[in-house]
Image (cartoon, rainbow, N blue to C red):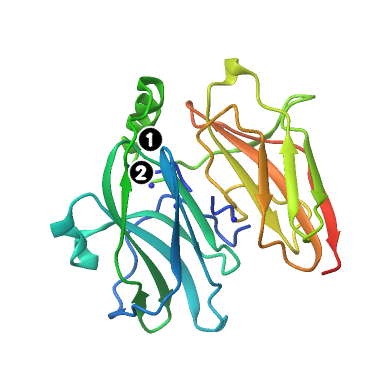
Amino acid sequence: MLKKHFSIFILILALGMPFSVAAETAVVPTVIDSSLHFRPILHEHGVEFRWFRWSKPREFVSYDIRRADSKDDSKSVEDTHSVAETTNRYSTNFEERLDKGTYYYRLCIVTKTKRICSANQAVTIKAELPESEKKKLALAEEVAEEPQVTMHDAPAGELMLRADLDADGNAVLSWTPMDDSFEVKAYKPVRSQDNPNLYYPHDGYLAHILDASRTMLVDDRTPAGTVYYRVCAVTLQDELYCGNVAAINNAK
């Protein structure tokens, strides 16, 4: 479908707990596995990562996305910091909006017995963010943990979600934006295969969208069967609003 902290997280991906800016992972042995698939997709002002779902559900604890802002800190997993974490095994996507610079990422898969981390992925962003977006990132970085918020239904006509399947069986999500007066910090589209009353952060988000003018997302890992989607908005006041639930039946 994760805390220069979140832009956080397309993790997009739905959630058992969602991608949230995370507390540090419990102490377990760390193993580096350079074969882990952890693919960056560069954008002008950020990066998106995709990976394969962990195939052993009984062992799985969480995904932990870790970032270092210097090459020296990137050499040790312990010197990186967690920018997103989710206990949702189906979350396989993370997106962060970044200012100009070079950043180093790892995917860590936490299991009951060990933490398996990918090799470093160096990402270089060549464009500076507009000043207004730098301020949003600065506000996000002031918070060490994702705040606990109470979910409110979005006002009538806002965050109205439509979900359609394209020819490849991908869910195409489009929604109406929140009014500017709400000062939206991020949109969190969420997905679930078994919860028709899904919401962030209870269900894993597919993406962490900082651009309040962006109102569309393609879920290119749409699972088969009935899938529920919803878009939630987190405001600068750390209030949470969620729109309607849209369901699709993917026969692929």
- Quarter-wise, where is residue 243 in the image? top right
Answer with left or right where residue 207 lies relative to residue 99.
right
The answer to whether the residues at label 1 and label 2 have Cβ atoms under 8 Å apart is yes
Q: Measuring 61% from the left and 32% from the top, which residue is drawn there? A: 214
Residue 15 or residue 80, whichever sits in front: 80
Q: Measuring 19% from the left and 60% from the top, which residue is drawn there? A: 79
Residue ID for mark 2 = 5
Residue 75 vertical position relative to residue 172 in the rendered view, above or below: below
Residue 50 vertical position relative to residue 179 in the rendered view, above or below: below
Kindly identify the amino acid type of the residue bearing the numbered disc 1.
Ala
| Mark 1 crowd level (few <14, some 14–19, many ≥20, 10 Å Cα) | many
Q: Secondary structure at mark 1?
A: helix
Name the disc covering residue 140, or none. 1
- Quarter-wise, where is residue 189 in the image? top right
Position of the C terminus, as image quadrant, is bottom right
Q: Measuring 50% from the left and 77% from the top, which residue is drawn there? A: 60
Residue 192 vertical position relative to residue 102 in the rendered view, above or below: below
Answer with left or right where residue 160 lies relative to residue 179.
right
Residue 251 point in image, percent of width and height: 86, 68
Q: Measuring 79% from the left and 24% from the top, which residue is drawn there? A: 156
Q: Residue furthest top?
A: 181
Answer with left or right where residue 230 lies relative to residue 5.
right
Residue 9 point in image, percent of width and height: 48, 48
Residue 59 point in image, percent of width and height: 50, 83
| Mark 2 crowd level (few <14, some 14–19, many ≥20, 10 Å Cα) | many
Residue 37 point in image, percent of width and height: 45, 72
Q: Secondary structure at mark 2?
A: loop
- Looking at the rendered structure, the number of numbered marks drawn on it comes to 2
Kindly identify the amino acid type of the residue bearing the numbered disc 2.
His
